[in-house]
Image (cartoon, rainbow, N blue to C red):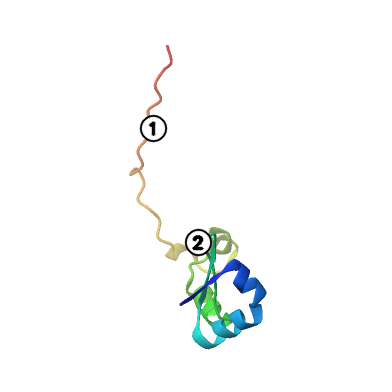
Amino acid sequence: MQTWQVQDAKARFSEFLDACLAEGPQMVTKRGAQAAVLIPVEVWERLQAAAKPSLKQLLLSDSNRADLELPARGQARRRVVQAVE
């Protein structure tokens, strides 16, 4: 994966985009730290399809909710609150 400084990616965006489409994901750094990745739309769509649905999507969906795995009850620890004297 090629790395681009943010100012280079901005100044040469067309080349940055072409590199992404030809070579795959391109890393963008800002002040030397990794900041973002530009990926081809095919990769994005594959990642989105593989992602688990959000709670909102699950609750709004027409799918059978009985197939959901729920954690066992009674396993959570309670926090002990200490009285202030």
Extreme residue toward the left, this view: 75
Please name whichever residue, 31 or 68, is drawn nearer the observer in this view of the structure: 31
Question: Which numbered marker is on residue 32?
Answer: 2
The mark tally for this picture is 2
Please name whichever residue, 83 or 31, is drawn nearer the observer in this view of the structure: 31
The image position of residue 57, as x and y in percent, is 57, 64
The image position of residue 71, as x and y in percent, is 37, 53
Distance between mark 2 and mark 1 Cα atoms: 41 Å
Q: Secondary structure at mark 1?
A: loop
* Residue at the image point whose x is 58% and y is 80% from the top: 41
Instruction: Determine crowd level at label 2: few under 14, some 14-19, many 20+ residues with C-alpha closer than 10 A.
Output: few
Q: Is residue 60 above or below residue 21?
A: above
Type of amino acid under label 2: Gly
* Residue at the image point whose x is 45% and y is 63% from the top: 66
Tell me: 52 left or right of 80.
right
Q: Earlier in the sequence, mark 2 or mark 1?
A: 2
Q: Secondary structure at mark 2?
A: loop
Read off the residue under disc 1: 79
The image position of residue 11, as x and y in percent, is 66, 74
